[in-house]
């Protein structure tokens, strides 16, 4: 059939071979596995071996003492169980803004203490890491000294591997060259400590306008992912540093400011299909004080968490133990609210049933991903997804 030359297929394969290779390498798709719903930042001098159970207890106390969250009893019970079982999913021991500028000997001691505390912690979250200082000229020597010192202590006790899902957070990145330099450093550290090649990975914090738009008009963040040479696991939005740098007044700095939405939209497009995951930022309005103040802070936090989820940001930052109840309540409510519809739409698509919604393969994959995220974070159980087991959803 047709009149095209029979050799055209081979010609096109040759013509587009480089493009095909680039797309496979640059856009490998979702990396698979669980993504934490949040990252908790704890200043290095406040991190200790019993922090996880302490935060869990504090979160449960806040839930008991403050005004009730506007969720049903079943969801409340699910959140309570989560706080008792796994209050923190992703922990970052912070040597940057949360820790501040200290004397070298003090930060050296803090790095040593942090590594030792992690090695004997009562409980370790599924994801853990450190945030070092930036690669800017005035902090990069201190940044590398802290990371090197932390790893030296960790591996000094005859340990041969990093903690599971260990990641380094690189803050205040403004240029792809900083990312490439840090990737080079990670390679040197791997050789020094016997870490498998590519095993030391990092996430990039987007906290400056130049990280979004370069002076030549290009999207800097996309070039940063390339510069990481496969080591970048995530892009994390920094609400307050970015807002301040963009000239937004303190009273109006927020995760839902239009400037924040623009930056995160660029991040989202740059990361789509690359296997690099996204995280929204934080709110600094903490649920402390009077009942009215706690209720207002919880309402704000829950709204912002839900808003992020609706926009495809499945992770955010938490800065206080009393934010954990609303993190899990809002996240669980989001997935439970949408589970039945996602299940029915996916089943109808696979059965080729006419439901009045014309879903396409990409939407079917998104429906499967939604249910899978709900299962992995604890919002849903097997009963909520019927015959869509985790394995089946993963295949879809």
Image (cartoon, rainbow, N blue to C red):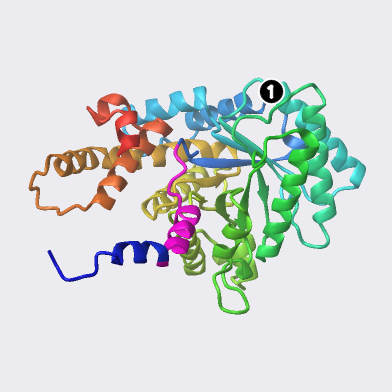
Q: Does 108 sit left or right of 385 as displayed?
A: right
Q: Position of residue 332 (x, y in %)?
A: 38, 37
Q: Position of residue 163 (x, y in %)?
A: 65, 29
Q: Position of residue 102 (x, y in %)?
A: 86, 48
Q: Residue at x 54, y 66 (%)?
A: 252
- Pick the front one: 241 or 214: 214
Majority SS type along the magenta span = helix
- The magenta-colored residue range is 15-32
Q: Is residue 25 magenta?
A: yes
* Disc 1 residue crowd, few under 14, some 14–19, many 20+, Cα 10 Å: some
Image quarter hosting the C terminus: top left
Residue farthest to the left?
Answer: 354
- Pick the front one: 49 or 236: 236
Q: Does 295 sit left or right of 354 as displayed?
A: right
Image quarter hosting the N terminus: bottom left
- Pick the front one: 16 or 194: 16
The total number of labels drawn is 1
Disc 1 marks which residue?
Answer: 121
Q: Is residue 336 visible?
A: yes
Q: Is residue 52 above or below residue 249?
A: above
Q: Is residue 250 visible?
A: no
């Amino acid at each position: 059939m047709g009149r095209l030359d029979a050799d055209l297929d081979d010609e096109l394969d040759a013509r587009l071979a480089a493009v095909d290779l680039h797309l496979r390498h640059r856009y490998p798709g979702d990396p698979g596995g669980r993504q934490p719903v949040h990252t908790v930042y704890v200043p290095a001098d406040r991190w200790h071996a019993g922090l996880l159970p302490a935060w869990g207890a504090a979160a449960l106390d806040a839930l008991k003492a403050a005004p009730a969250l506007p969720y049903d009893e079943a969801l409340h019970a699910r959140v309570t169980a989560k706080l008792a079982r796994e209050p923190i999913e992703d922990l970052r021991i912070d040597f940057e803004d949360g820790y501040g500028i200290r004397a070298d000997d003090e930060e050296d001691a803090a790095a040593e203490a942090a590594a030792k505390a992690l090695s004997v912690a009562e409980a370790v979250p599924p994801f853990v890491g450190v945030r070092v200082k930036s690669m800017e000229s005035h902090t990069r020597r201190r940044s590398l000294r802290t990371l090197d010192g932390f790893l030296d202590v960790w591996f000094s006790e005859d340990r041969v591997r990093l903690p599971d899902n260990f990641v380094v957070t690189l803050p205040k990145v403004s240029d792809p060259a900083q990312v490439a330099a840090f990737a080079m450093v990670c390679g040197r550290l791997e050789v020094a400590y016997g870490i498998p090649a590519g095993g030391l990975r990092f996430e990039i914090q987007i906290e400056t306008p130049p990280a979004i738009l370069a002076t030549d008009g290009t999207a800097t963040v996309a070039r940063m992912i390339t510069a990481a040479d496969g080591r970048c696991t995530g892009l994390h939005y920094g609400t307050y540093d970015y807002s301040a740098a963009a000239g937004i007044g303190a009273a109006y700095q927020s995760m839902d400011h239009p400037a924040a939405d623009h930056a995160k939209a660029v991040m989202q497009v740059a990361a789509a299909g690359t296997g690099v995951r996204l995280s929204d930022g934080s709110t600094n309005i903490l649920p402390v004080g009077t009942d009215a103040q706690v209720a207002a802070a919880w309402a704000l936090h829950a709204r912002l968490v839900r808003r992020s989820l609706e926009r495809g940001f499945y992770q955010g930052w938490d800065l206080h133990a009393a934010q954990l109840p609303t993190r899990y309540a809002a996240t669980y409510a989001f997935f439970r609210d949408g589970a039945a519809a996602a299940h029915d739409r996916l089943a109808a698509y696979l059965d080729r049933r006419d439901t009045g919604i014309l879903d396409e393969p990409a939407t079917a994959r998104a429906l499967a991903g939604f249910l899978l995220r709900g299962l992995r974070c604890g919002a849903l159980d097997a009963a909520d997804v019927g015959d869509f087991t985790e394995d089946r959803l993963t295949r879809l």
